[in-house]
């Protein structure tokens, strides 16, 4: 009768040893596989990158200072005394839709008429230009129909000085704005 | 019966101890040797230092009259180590058709030679060449090129760097 508990104890010990060995073997195998996988992935690295393009409306005018001189050399008896300057260029870049360029002078009422005429050689097929005579200080549409484009145009400024007005000078600060319709 | 088992266990462990002592005494009487083989496998490791990159194209990126607007980032770097010879680092993006162009250049590498500036696509391209057995770093310069004619928008990339045989 006493042999049965001994045999049961030995059997239990045998099973425990077997299970322990099996668990140890499985652990070693799993560790080895995991290590191999980790080693294989180390030759690759990843990085997250994002960028956003905001609406951009950029405008610039060259020839920051323009002088129109009406003198004896510009007098033509068949027309009013006048002076013309085409040195300036207007440049713009917009990635927005339905944009226009307005123009305004700081001078409310000049003695001499000042006219601006854009030449749209490089403005894009959709743009339209208007000739503007500065009569007050209100902004007016100069170029319309701009859509996701970069362009440029020549600015022709012309001043007319009727003889009855006499001599003198007008100073204008001309401001160009790229804006939505 | 329990006493018999106890006696048996004591005898067993005593035998073990005596055997151990004998082994030590035997060892003191001569020398023994064995061979040890060291095996080193090829190891390569690459990681990005600096994390997430965020870029913005705005008015500061534009020049009036130009369709192309650009912005750049050089705040992150790449670090690597390899005991294999003649390696290179490649880079690719996960985006198959990004709206805007993204370029990458390895700057100031401590090892290897930078490849020409890479326009990132979903096919791996060369970033850094001629990496010998070494550990090194390089700065990562990302440049975004956005055309005004493409309008506004966002691109999100996952850039994958891989060390491979050259």
Image (cartoon, rainbow, N blue to C red):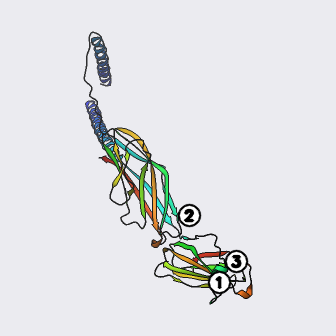
Residue A9 occupies quadrant: top left
* Disc 1 chain ID: A
Distance of mark 3 from mark 1, alpha carbons?
27 Å
Q: Which numbered dot is residue A123? A: none
Distance of mark 2 from mark 3, alpha carbons?
27 Å
Which residue occupies the foreground of this view, B95 or A54? A54
Q: Which numbered dot is residue A106? A: 3
Which residue corresponds to the image point at 65% horizontal and 87% vertical from the top-left?
A: A80
Do the numbered discs 2 and 1 sit on residues whose CB atoms are within 8 Å?
Answer: no
Which residue corresponds to the image point at 39% horizontal and 46% vertical from the top-left?
A: B46
Q: Image height check: is A16 above or below A58? A: above
Instruction: Say if residue A146 shows up in the picture.
Output: no
Could you tell me how many numbered marks the image carries?
A: 3
Q: Count residues near mark 3 (Cα–Cα under 10 Å), then give few for <14, some for 14-19, many for 20+.
A: some
Residue A32 occupies quadrant: top left
Q: Secondary structure at mark 3?
A: loop
Q: Is residue A1 left or right of residue A74?
A: left
Q: Secondary structure at mark 1?
A: loop
Residue pointed to by mark 1: A75
Q: In the orientation shown, which residue stands out farthest toward the top?
A: B29
Give a yes or no on whether discs 3 and 1 share a subunit. Answer: yes
Q: Is residue A69 left or right of residue B14?
A: right
Residue pointed to by mark 2: B60
Q: Nearer the viewer, mark 2 or mark 1?
A: 1
Residue A89 occupies quadrant: bottom right
């Amino acid at each position: 009768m006493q042999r049965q508990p001994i045999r049961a104890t030995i059997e239990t010990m045998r099973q425990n040893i077997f299970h322990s060995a099996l668990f140890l073997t499985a652990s070693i195998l799993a560790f080895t596989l995991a290590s191999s996988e980790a080693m294989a992935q180390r030759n690759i690295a990843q990085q997250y990158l994002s960028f956003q393009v905001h609406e951009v409306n950029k405008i610039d005018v060259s020839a920051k200072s323009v002088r129109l001189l009406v003198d004896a050399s510009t007098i033509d008896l068949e027309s009013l005394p006048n002076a013309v300057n085409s040195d300036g260029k207007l440049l713009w870049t917009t990635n927005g839709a339905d944009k226009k360029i307005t123009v305004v002078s700081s001078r409310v009422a000049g003695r001499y008429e000042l006219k601006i005429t854009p030449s749209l050689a490089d403005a894009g097929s959709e743009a339209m230009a208007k000739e503007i005579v500065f009569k007050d200080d209100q902004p007016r549409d100069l170029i319309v129909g701009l859509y996701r484009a970069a362009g440029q145009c020549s600015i022709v400024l012309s001043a007319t000085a009727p003889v009855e007005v006499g001599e003198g000078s007008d100073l204008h600060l001309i401001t160009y704005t790229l804006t939505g319709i | 019966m329990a006493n018999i088992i106890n006696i048996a266990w004591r005898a067993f462990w005593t035998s073990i101890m005596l055997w151990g002592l004998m082994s030590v005494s035997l060892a003191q009487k001569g020398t023994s040797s064995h061979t040890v083989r060291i095996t080193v496998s090829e190891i390569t490791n690459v990681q990005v230092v600096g994390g997430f990159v965020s870029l913005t194209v705005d008015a500061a990126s534009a020049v009036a009259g130009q369709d192309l607007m650009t912005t750049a980032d050089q705040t992150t770097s790449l670090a690597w180590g390899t005991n294999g010879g003649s390696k290179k680092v490649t880079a690719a993006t996960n985006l198959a058709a990004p709206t805007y162009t993204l370029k990458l250049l390895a700057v100031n590498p401590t090892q290897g030679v930078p490849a020409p500036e890479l326009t990132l696509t979903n096919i791996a391209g060369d970033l850094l060449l001629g990496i010998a057995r070494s550990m090194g770093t390089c700065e990562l310069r990302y440049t975004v090129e956005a055309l005004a004619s493409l309008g506004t928008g966002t691109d999100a990339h996952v850039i994958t760097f891989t060390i491979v045989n050259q």
